[in-house]
Amino acid sequence: MSWVYEQFICAFLVGCTFLSVLSHPDKAPKYTFLREAASAPQILTYDYIVIGGGTCGCPLAATLSQGATVLVLERGGSPYTNPEQININNFVNSLADISPSSFSQPFISRDGVLNSRARALGGGSVLNAGFYSRASSKYIVDSGWNETLAKDSYQWVEKKVAFEPPMLQWQSAVKDGLLEVGVLPYNGFTFDHLYGTKVGGTIFDKEGNRHTAADLLEYADPKRISVYLHATVQKILFKYNTEKRRQQAYGVIFKDALGVMHRAYLSTKGKSEIILSAGAIGSPQLLMLSGIGPANHLQAHGIKVVLDQPLVGQGMADNPLNVLLVPSPVPVEVSLVQTVGITKFGSFIEAASGLSLGHSWSERLQGIFEFVSNQSGQPSMFPPVADTIRSLANPILKGGVLLEKIIGPRSTGHLELINTNPNDNPSVTFNYFKDPEDLRKCVEGMRTIIDVINSKAFSKFRYHNMPVQSLIDLMLHLPVNLRPKHANAAFSLEQYCIDTVLTIWHYHGGCQSGKVVDHNYKVIGVEALRVIDGSTFHRSPGTNPQATVMMLGRYMGEKIIKKRFFHGRK
Ligand SMILES: Cc1cc2nc3c(=O)[nH]c(=O)nc-3n(C[C@H](O)[C@H](O)[C@H](O)COP(=O)(O)OP(=O)(O)OC[C@H]3O[C@@H](n4cnc5c(N)ncnc54)[C@H](O)[C@@H]3O)c2cc1C
Ligand SMILES: *[C@@H]1O[C@H](CO)[C@@H](O)[C@H](O)[C@H]1NC(C)=O
Ligand SMILES: *[C@@H]1O[C@H](CO)[C@@H](O)[C@H](O)[C@H]1NC(C)=O
């Protein structure tokens, strides 16, 4: 990006924030400790530096501030500036916004699937579909977490941001359809992960207002925390620790919206640390930009190697999402995910309805594909826009989608740098359905969706002259991704899964625990650096991950701060 352009963007961003504070005093940023990075000193010193004020970073930083000074550096803006923009009606619009100040940064994986990274205080919870559901007890045990502390941490999160959804007609019909086709028992409204059909939590309140991970900063001690917005960390700094005989993180360099560089250092007292919570794309990318990663790959980009760690960027995975779009003869409520079928064969069935699409969905999709493809190193095929889909140009979708996500997944890929600019997307490959087990789960999930659509409970939302086959054909004509389409996809659910795969944005991995970080989330082989966020996962937790990502922030914050005091007393 040119300097002049950056100046313009900054003037624009700062100006907008300033004006909106003046004109809507009630919508002013609610925290005294929340500031623009452009107003930060040249040099700062804190006990903990949290990189990324996202879904995990916010609860983590709030907790650490109970016993130490904490600096949060977030590259995006504030979700409090314009609450309308992130309410339930603007889910698709927010996601489709491709302006540089958008909370969504689009990317296309090497698999040809359009995806999105969060860029806001609150991270993915500012952009997501809001469904809130805990991980299974087995997942918690397998992760080596203390079950009591995990439960306490979930509850700490839920007190602020989790609600019971309204469950109107569309969501109720999906729930009843799931029960009718045998996804049993019915478990009612619960945050717990149980086989059968249930109503889960949501971060949208009854008015449709979104409550993001940034709200967890209400728990922070305002005297000990500073949160800077539009603060993009460029790299983590290391020096050699002669006693420990290895590299030790001691600070970071970050850039503000004016393009000015600042440095933040760790205080030397106690157990100061840098904690990377930049998400499943940002964390492996920033480790590599800071010199931790596969040595030959880093050298090829002119990066000085701090630690040769071939596992950084490995184990990247994204749970494949497959859907059927169901136009409805009767109006439907606006709903994101509220009910879920948790099947024994490893597929989760969910639904959404009445999405507000602004203007023509297909043209918009085409525009985003073109925008992302124009950026360096991205795949550059364009899907043809079929004339038939122009009929979907209605601004509010009358109808909805039934979707299925598979557990895991078992198929994994990798992440590589394209360049050394931290603002740019790295190259990411997920290898959807490479493992045949994943494909089998998808096919069974699609069969369940078809049964639900054909169920009695769902019949009022069906056009009776539109059999399931025509819904399949419709999807095959939509420009949903950049993958090749095969004629037999209309008849083979295997091929349908492969050709129409989408993302549910639950991508994870890249800094996996036991590989890049140890079981305390410390980066193996260096001092004073941890990674705590979705990049450490081997599988996506629960039906949807955000509950567990927020829980992990609180959980690790508690562990770290307790240990700090324990050591202090000795
Ligand atoms: C559209 C969408 C819908 C979803 N729907 C659901 C759902 O309904 N339910 C659910 O449970 N989950 C959902 N998810 C998934 C869930 O939101 C994510 O798994 C979760 O938010 C990931 O949290 P994280 O802390 O790992 O990363 P993030 O929340 O992405 O946090 C990373 C933060 O780091 C910042 N950052 C990155 N690089 C830098 C840098 N160099 N310097 C400074 N800051 C940096 C980013 O701006 C970001 O704020 C959805 C996600 C999306 C995108
Ligand atoms: C688990 O966490 C609880 C609550 O913080 C704590 O009381 C207990 O000692 C922990 N158990 C273990 C084995 O660490
Ligand atoms: C993408 O690049 C093409 C060719 O350079 C250009 O005509 C088009 O306007 C660009 N599209 C977008 C959305 O940036």
Image (cartoon, grey):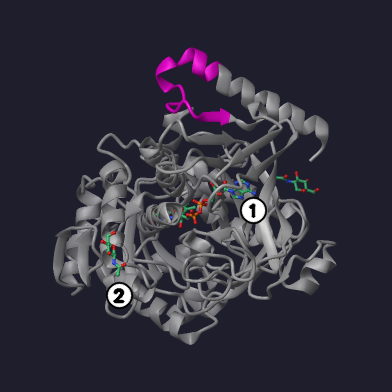
Q: Helix, strand, or loop for circle 2?
A: helix
Quadrant showing the N terminus: top right
Name the residue nearer the viewer: 275 or 130. 275
Quadrant position of residue 163? top left
Mark 1 = which residue?
Answer: 369
Q: What residue type is labelled 2?
A: Lys
Labelled disc at residue 396: none
At which x and y percent is residue 235? 71, 51
Q: Is residue 474 left or right of residue 333?
A: right
Which of disc 1 and disc 2 is earlier in sequence? 2
- Residue sitting at 58 percent across and 66 percent down? 523
- Residue sitting at 17 percent across and 62 percent down? 176
Mark 2 = which residue?
Answer: 138
Residue 24 colored magenta?
A: yes
At which x and y percent is residue 182? 18, 75
Magenta-colored span = 19-35
* Residue 482 seen in render: yes
